[in-house]
Image (cartoon, rainbow, N blue to C red):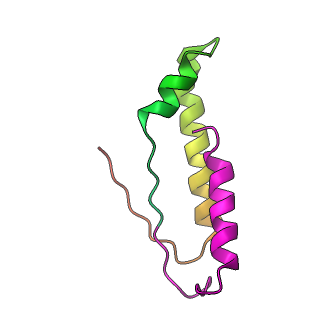
């Protein structure tokens, strides 16, 4: 999840430059999927594993806010599993 803000910026840039997409008028839906591998492989190397949930939360919020602020007509859905 540490890379997700970078991935959000890359996604916005790719959508903006895609000639098939009208960036300002087309609706967009983004699905964010994260698996346990990200957390499981990273937590073993941390000096303070208890800080991981907060770091994970901050990275995800940063990415979601970036997409919200930089991608017009983005469908906003909340799913909790």
Instruction: Specify the quadrant of the image occupied by residue 18.
Output: bottom right
Name the spot of residue 35 as percent of width and height, x first: 43, 39
Which residue: 50% across, 28% down?
39
> Up-down: is 26 above or below 59?
below
Foreground: 75 or 12? 12
> Up-down: is 9 above or below 13?
above
Instruction: Magenta stretch: give its range.
Output: 1-29
Which residue: 61% across, 16% down?
45
Name the spot of residue 76 as percent of width and height, x first: 44, 65
> Up-down: is 51 above or below 23?
above
Give left or right: position of 13 versus 40. Answer: right
Foreground: 40 or 76? 40
> Up-down: is 64 above or below 45?
below
Name the spot of residue 52 as percent of width and height, x first: 56, 24
Foreground: 17 or 77? 17
Whether the magenta-drawn stretch holds residue 23 is answered as: yes
Give the number of marks. Answer: 0
Which residue sits furthest left? 81
Which residue: 62% across, 16% down?
46
Name the spot of residue 22 as percent of width and height, x first: 60, 87
Which residue sits furthest top? 47
Which residue: 64% across, 11% down?
47
Whether the magenta-drawn stretch holds residue 50 is answered as: no
Quarter of the C terminus within the rendering = top left
Give left or right: position of 7 versus 56. Answer: right
Quarter of the N terminus within the rendering = top right
């Amino acid at each position: 999840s540490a890379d997700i803000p970078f991935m959000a910026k890359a996604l916005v840039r790719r959508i903006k430059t895609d000639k098939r997409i009208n960036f300002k008028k087309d609706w967009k839906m983004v699905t964010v999927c994260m698996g346990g591998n990200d957390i499981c492989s990273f937590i073993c190397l941390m000096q303070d594993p208890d800080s991981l949930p907060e770091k994970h939360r901050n990275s995800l919020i940063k990415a979601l806010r970036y997409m919200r602020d930089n991608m017009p007509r983005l469908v906003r859905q909340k799913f909790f599993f």
